Image (cartoon, coloured by chain):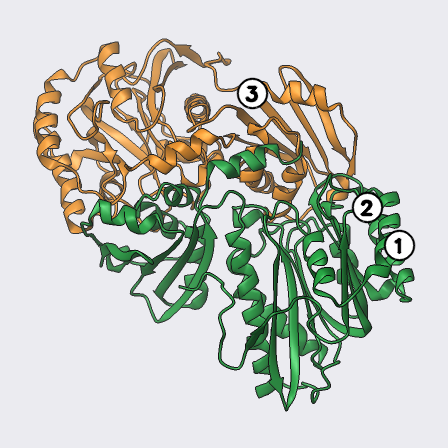
Chain colours: A orange, B green
Amino acid sequence: MSSGYKTQTKDINVISGNIVAPEGFYAAGAHIGIKRKRKDLTLIKSEIPATAAGVFTLNAIKAPPVLWNQGHIHNKIRGIIINSGVANSCTGKTGTKNAELMAQIYAECINAHKDEVLVSSTGVIGVQLPMDKIEHGIKNLSPALDRTDESAENAALGILTTDKFIKEIAVEIEIGGKTVKIGAIAKGSGMIHPNMATMLAFITTDIDIDRDLLQKALKETVDDSYNMISIDGDTSTNDMVIVLANARAGNTPVNSENENYHKFKKALEHVNLYLAKQIIMDGEGATRFIEVEVKGTATKNDAKSIAKSIINSNLFKTAMFGADANWGRIMCAAGYSGVKFDYTKSSVGFSSNAGSFNTLTCGEPVGFDEDEALKILKEREIKVTLTLEEGGAQAAAWGCDLSYEYVRINGEYRT
Amino acid sequence: MSSGYKTQTKDINVISGNIVAPEGFYAAGAHIGIKRKRKDLTLIKSEIPATAAGVFTLNAIKAPPVLWNQGHIHNKIRGIIINSGVANSCTGKTGTKNAELMAQIYAECINAHKDEVLVSSTGVIGVQLPMDKIEHGIKNLSPALDRTDESAENAALGILTTDKFIKEIAVEIEIGGKTVKIGAIAKGSGMIHPNMATMLAFITTDIDIDRDLLQKALKETVDDSYNMISIDGDTSTNDMVIVLANARAGNTPVNSENENYHKFKKALEHVNLYLAKQIIMDGEGATRFIEVEVKGTATKNDAKSIAKSIINSNLFKTAMFGADANWGRIMCAAGYSGVKFDYTKSSVGFSSNAGSFNTLTCGEPVGFDEDEALKILKEREIKVTLTLEEGGAQAAAWGCDLSYEYVRINGEYRT
């Protein structure tokens, strides 16, 4: 099991770097007074207009920044402005104006047009943005846009809400003799229960790639990463993943689904999977990282549905918090996933760095040593494997346990 | 807002009574050693064969007792045997045999055939029933079957798991000059998160009614009661609601959907709604009873979907635990319910015995006094109203908050 460490993969070189690793990108972050103390404004800039692609929340209520971006994602983009602390969601007509105003103010600072700027907000719903602070903040922070590690770290900090650590990664690949880089930052779910996660990720890359292919690679890698910690359709009002590609690497343009496209897509998948797992690692109150692997289903979608049903079960999550091998809750959640299967042919096992044990084999419960099980489940990283006999497909989902701390954080969040 | 007190309703007389209130029914309950201390076996008997109807879990994994009952619910029924502590679910071939064996042992004790006995189990999944204790228990307890309040209370206790109090009610109505009674007991969700509730209810009545009509009345009243605290398809492996009607009231048989049918159905609805709300009141770790009312939707199903989405939101539930008027979480959950609506025309308000306040009016946030809001939300019973402008339908769902205590109970349940 990989818990998302920056492991090296064939053809993908994980480098020491961040959102400004790709050529031609600048970043900055600061505290401008939306939150009490922590940084709450992030600016990202491409020195030349970049091709953009995005994946947005499926929530019926889309916050004004989401709607703004959906209307502008097909444009060439010069920058992204993100604030944390206030989500600018359910904010009526004022909220719609404020999202546009944020784009306009930032655009002026970087000699761009507002239509070349994307906007993102995260935080409390239903509160208006303090536009005076934001205007001041943008104007003060723009001159600090830079390619240093410090400016990138500030940018990574500015998008966080209840996250305990920054989430960033940079990788490089070679395309036709040219080095192509990808850098990214993400904002944690802020919530342990994936179907209410507010999730943001911003990705920069200097690859030269066709827009439709960029969108396709993004969509597909998001489906197998963030969407396996966050259920389609069950997303917050502000979720988004955006990638900007400014072509500064000078590679032969990627215009078809050729070898180079797949190389890039694989690197993008590495980035997204790493950040998705980091988000879980930083789940509110999380004490355990859990991988649920479902094998032997008729289709990959079946495996995904079952894995997500299990990882979302409060009862399963509290059992994991208690290091309790209560595998019945796994079967119960699999059973109400909506996927039909013959449970009399299914098997369940747990594993961690401390060992492994089975609890169900072909539908029959098997005895296990409770002390040994406790030792295995007390590890920080736990893997659950459910094996069916319905076919050859499989999938994994990732999540964390449900702890007292989760209740504390979310009972007090707004106040 | 009614939190489920035994309020009198026109034509429905709530009487001091229980599962043995209807003529010809007997009950008993005892501790037989499945659980450590609390009662864990309940017997219900009808002195003459009764017409039976049932609603069962939609979970793909159905515990052996559920499968047994589905195969026998069309028979005339003499008794129901229920154990708590072990769910007899995911127990392979042994579990299937044990469910049948329970029916057989009890049938012999009451001079019935095993095909005239229904079976129910609740508790831990994946553990085999201690059949020696159960056989002994049934044989020892059967002679205690009685129509006293004490025997009925023991029966109400025997079906509980983590419930803190028994749930029972009895009502009477008049049908063509004859008094018809309904008595019922229920087992609490045991879990605060409705979509994983294990819910049992057993209803007795002395009405003379056609089986198909009994099934119809049960199904429809379950949909508006238990199913508004428990999502269709997202039920445990053991959920069931069973009603036995033994015709001892001597009323003119109810053979069509006439006035008498509707009178009975209304009384049955009263019983089921009362028990459903009692289940919420007893939710694990619950400190607040919450009613979510959704108005102004195109269809009743839309209102139900939105109300259930809100009441199931961990973030909303933790906010309620913290007495935090974080109405954004209500909008967010409504938004991912799958129902499309124009949020710019929606309104949100909170109320309790201490007063009421609005937070959103026609899509625009409205200011409210935080101190006043805190006072209102610190009450034990809270009502949330979401009003849309999509049509004239409405529905309500009921739930409770998510507390530290929930995590404690469910992190330690099996051990």
Q: Residue B21 location, x and y as percent?
A: 68, 72
Contact, mark 2 vs mark 3 (Cβ under 8 Å)? no
Q: Residues within 10 Å of mark 1 (few under 14, many from 20)?
A: some
Q: Residues within 10 Å of mark 2 (few under 14, many from 20)?
A: many
Depth check, mark 3 against mark 1: the one in front is 1
Depth check, mark 2 against mark 3: the one in front is 2
Q: Does the rendering let one see residue B76?
A: no
Quote the CA–CA distance across marks 2 and 1.
20 Å
Residue found 13% across the figure and 45% down from its top: A97
Determine which residue is flagged by label 2.
Answer: B95
* Closest to the observer, A203 or B272: B272
Please identify the quadrant where the N terminus of chain A is shown.
Answer: top right
Instruction: Point out the tag, 2 or 1, that comes first from the N-terminus.
Output: 2
Residue found 27% across the figure and 21% down from its top: A157
Determine which residue is flagged by label 1.
Answer: B139
Q: How many marks?
A: 3
- Tell me the quarter of the picture where residue A133 sits: top left
Q: Residue B287 location, x and y as percent?
A: 45, 46
Residue found 31% across the figure and 62% down from its top: B387
- Tell me the quarter of the picture where residue A98 sits: top left
Q: Residue B291 location, x and y as percent?
A: 42, 57
Secondary structure beneath disc 1? helix
* Closest to the observer, A184 or A392: A184
Secondary structure beneath disc 2? helix
- Amino acid type at circle 2 is Gly
Determine which residue is flagged by label 3.
Answer: A381
